[in-house]
Image (cartoon, rainbow, N blue to C red):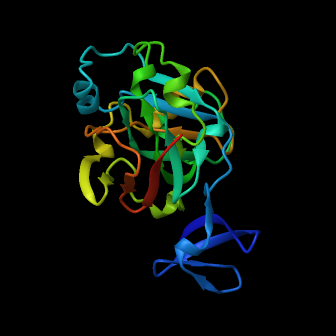
Amino acid sequence: MKQGRVLYESTLHHVTELDGKVQLKDGRLIEEHEVEWLPPVETETIFTLGLNYADHAKELSFTSPLPEPLVFLKGKNTITGHRGTTVRPEDVEFMHYECELAVVIGKSGKNIKKEEALDYVKGYTVANDYAFRDYLENYFRPNLRVKNRDGCTPVGPWFVSKEEIEDPMNLQLRTYVNGEKTQEGSTKDMILGIPELIEYLSSFMTLNDGDMILTGTPKGSVDTKVGDEVMTEVEGVGRLTNTIVSE
């Protein structure tokens, strides 16, 4: 069952998906454009993986192996919902999407072994983690402005429990810009999979219920312009739509 959160008639509703429509708890079916979408889960700490797909690293002309995962944090200000907008700053020449599987932690834990890591996962959603690459300092010190602008990370529309995803390490990811497919990959091509990421992060800090891990993106990063509609899709999880707007 796909679960979400929306505002409808000025009221917060916890909803589910039925036949491509939004179902309220009272059974009413609403078209998705009739509601204001919120992120499907309330996030706590947000971890973001850089260069976790070898083909994406090569695409960015970065071929040296990293001694450990490249992880940085995102503020809650970055998160926005399905069918929302993201601003392209006027001084940016290269703003690209990143279709990612987002992992939602379901219970607290530290020093979690990778063999037990999925026991700590609540479920999954789709994230589009826009990057403003003009602001990048270097790959070892990612600049805050690259990944922490307001509303630069659409998430949703749906949350899917882990029980509904047979193998999170074998899901197709695709991105479409104005209806044209520009990115395609698979979670099986992650350098570090979900169990390894959870083991690594929990080795030095506690992971908590509501934490979210954005697991990286495959190759296919294309510059996006004002007016572009970007749809990011993760197999079995959902399709997330966002529009680029000007300042």
Q: Position of residue 117 (x, y in %)?
A: 52, 40
Residue depicted at x 53% and y 38%: 213
Residue 185 rendering spot, x and y as whole percentages: 26, 46
Between residues 226 and 23, which one lies in front from this camera angle?
226
Work out which quarter of the rendered image holds the C terminus and state it.
Answer: top right
- Among the 4 quarters of the image, the one containing residue 68: top left
| Residue 12 shown left or right of residue 164 in the figure | right
At 31% from the left and 57% from the top, the residue drawn is: 178
Q: Is residue 241 left or right of residue 6?
A: left
Above or below 205: residue 195: below
Residue 19 appears in the figure: yes
Residue under the image location 55 percent in, 32 percent down: 47
Q: Position of residue 187 (x, y in %)?
A: 33, 45
Q: Is residue 14 above or below residue 90?
A: below
Give the image location of residue 98, x and y in percent: 39, 40
Near-viewer residue (184 or 9): 9
